[in-house]
Image (cartoon, rainbow, N blue to C red):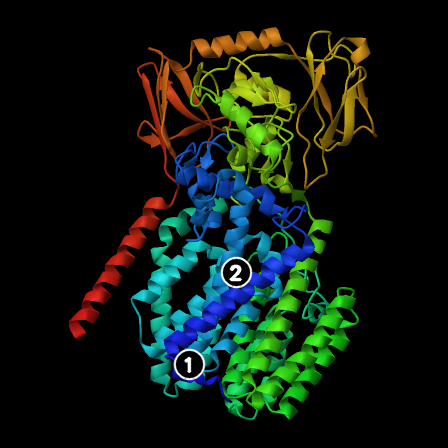
Amino acid sequence: MSTPHRSQHRSPRRLSLSGSALAALLTAVAVCAGDAAARVFPYGSRHRSINDLGNQFVPFHAHLWDLLHGRAEGGLLFNWQSGYGTSFLPDLGTYLTSPLSVLVGLFPRADIDLAVYVVTVLKTAVAAAAMAWLLRTHRRGPWWAAGLLGASYALCGWSVIEASYNPMWLDGLIAFPLLCLTGEWALRGRRLLLAPLVVAVCWTANFYTAYMATLGAALVLVVRVVLTREDLRTRAAVIGRAAGTTLLGIVLAAPVLVPLFLSSGRAYPGWVKEFRPVSWADLFARLLPATYSFSSPAVFVSTGTLLLVAALPFHRAVPVRTRLWWAGLTVAVALSLQWAPAHLAWHLFATPNGSPYRQTFVLAGIAVIAAWTGLAAGPPRPPALAAGAGLLAAAVLWARGSTLGTDWGYALFAGGLALAGAAWWALRHRLALPAAGLLAAVLLAQAAATTAYGHKGKLGGLDDYPSWGAAHTARAEALAGAEGWPAYRTDPSRPALSGNDPMLLGGEGGSYYSSHTPEVFTHTMVALGAGWTSRGRNVQSIDNPVTDALFAVGARLQPDGTVRRAEVPPLVTTRPPGAPVSYGDSPFANQELLLGARVYEDPLAPGVCRAGTEAYLWAPEYNATARLADGPAFRLNGNAPRNRAALQPMGVSHGASSALVFDAAPPPRWTLSCLDRARLDTAVATLRATAATSLRVGSSQIRAELPAGATGTAVLSVPAIAGWTCNGRPAAAHLGLVALPLDGRTTTLSCSFRPPGLLPGAAAAGLALVVLAGLAIKRRQRT
């Protein structure tokens, strides 16, 4: 095998850099071409922000933009804008701690969707470059082939279909080759001080996929050790070095990881389901380009790569032992996708919500390494290529029993197989440039087609959310114009553009959607009448004047773009002494309990409120429209258990002419209650009279001056999540809100928030730094 004459005189490092640059370029071109072919943002009018991308990740990056530019309410530890105040460090560690995420700060805020897209493409390109570098580190071979295989890894089906709208997963795509590289350093006894730092960055960027990448890298290292080290003691030393540097790196990430894990344990439980493997026909069908399925493994990599992997067992230039180990590892990891115990091990022993094959990128990475192992020994001979092609043909024939294959997919696969075979044959005849051109064409065509087809499947089956446009700008400007924090909150309200409108648009609202949505917050808001989606993790704001008074919401955005203002108590109020109380089943009674006054009255007749009162309907399971007979219809979105309908304002009653009408069959559980505004005004005036007299709010603390002689309980209108301390001791709770018992002598309330686990995590990281410094000193003394 030969490479172009000029490359023979270039240094190995420069060749590796060239391969990485080629991999990054091909990857970016393929992704952008696929997106353009699908006519999705930013190349067309179709939305790109489907599912959690638009509902969570874009708003979180918008909040990061605000933090970077000093415009956010809160800081790295606490977020005053979402869920009426919630911990932010776990969200930061889950969604935003990739070193590349900060690049969104370079874009105008109105281009946040474009910023997230650019970062997504960049992450994919970096993964390709990292894999190309790893391949050249493992074995010498053609730099351009390393670039093609690196791009093949980054453009696997999992990447362009699933991780493309979960951009933090792409940090795992980057982490796998980097962690394999730290294993290679352990194998060679090199860079033992740099390796823990690399591990720490990978685990901090996204611990979830980094965990999977670590398992995959460990398997790769085991094969490398077995094949390159014969002595048992030497093998043990290599494994020990790798384990030590990995553990040290994970501990360095502890200030983020420990609070994150503790927060996950206190989050509202997500969807729990039993893992069921897909049919083998479906799995083999996903080897094809241009397929889509939300619940099967997207194992596609370029057909050129697949042909090398399939030919490896028959490649006589590779030692038999090497062939068996790498082919065996690839098959074993593929089988592990379908075995329930292995599935649990890959996913931190919990079946994930949504896609159950999130570890698929590790299989793609191992397949690419196996392909490189064969190619580095020389191009496969025609008999090996024929045998490999036969294996792939058998897999495709098996896939005919699946409904996931497409005509385009079969055509692209067949054409790609023929061109890839021709390319590897040309390489044996020293025709490197034509071979590289053919393989690049196959890679770009198949990856772009898979990207475009994935958009078709996602847009057809998942929710989508509009990119920033005129509606976003109008709402953001209205909220900014009404801003009064910390004297009062401004709430973006409903209907929402996303599950995290306060972060996306501004204000300090009640809606919040995260993997870390606190259980105490969900229960409290639901008790007061909130709706939810995503089975309780996407809690909606409550459009209700009583809860506005309870949470100091002085300005609420209306659907027509105007702002409804109200005189409300401040963030800190007091409640008179009394026996402990708890919420019941009625959101109306629960609101009155927290308010400390009766403000609702029962209907005069079933479904008819007294004239002049405001009608509110609570029907959490109702999934249709309802109205007062003389008023407009309102849509309630109750589709248990995924969705829960919010307590709905129906309008001012005019008496008998305003009878409640359900436009579908009435739900089995519903209540109509009638708000008396005069009573509410009196209750608010009472709370204001005994509330804090002055207030100062910091990034994660609040200080208030209380009326002299105050007794009972001081209540901070913030959910009582773990981490709050008030006046030097852990905060108490009053009906789900932060509270401090008063003894008549307390005149100041000083509360601060620190994420649980931050100090232990910081202490562990400090100890790890001491160990790392000791190793550095010891290493320097030896030299």
Viewer-side residue, 151 vs 703: 151
Viewer-side residue, 361 vs 308: 308
**Residue 84: image location, x then y, percent:** 50, 29
**Residue 716: image location, x then y, percent:** 43, 24
Q: Is residue 267 visible?
A: no
Viewer-side residue, 586 vs 659: 659
Bin the neighbour count of mark 1 within 10 Å (Cα to Cα): few under 14, some 14-19, many 20 and up. many
Residue at 41% over, 38% down? 67
Query: Hey, what amino acid is under mark 1?
Result: Val
Of marks 1 and 2, which one's residue comes earlier in the chain?
Answer: 2
Indicate the secondary structure of the residue bearing disc 2.
Answer: helix
- Residue 726: give its label: none
Find disc 1 in the rendering and name its residue. Answer: 225
Residue at 39% over, 22% down? 741
| Picture quadrant where residue 226 is located | bottom left
| Picture quadrant where residue 238 is located | bottom left
Query: Hey, what amino acid is under mark 2?
Result: Thr
Find disc 2 in the rendering and name its residue. Answer: 124
**From the viewer's perspective, is the residue at label 1 or at label 2 nearer?**
2
**Residue 82: image location, x then y, percent:** 50, 33
Bin the neighbour count of mark 2 within 10 Å (Cα to Cα): few under 14, some 14-19, many 20 and up. many
Q: Is residue 537 visible?
A: yes
**Residue 54: image location, x then y, percent:** 60, 44
Compared to 378, does 123 lie above or below? Answer: above
Drawn side of residue 203 relative to residue 401, left or right: left
Compared to 658, does 48 lie above or below? Answer: below
Drawn side of residue 359 relative to residue 105, left or right: right
| Picture quadrant where residue 639 is located | top right
Indicate the secondary structure of the residue bearing disc 1.
Answer: helix
| Quadrant containing the C terminus in the rendered view | bottom left
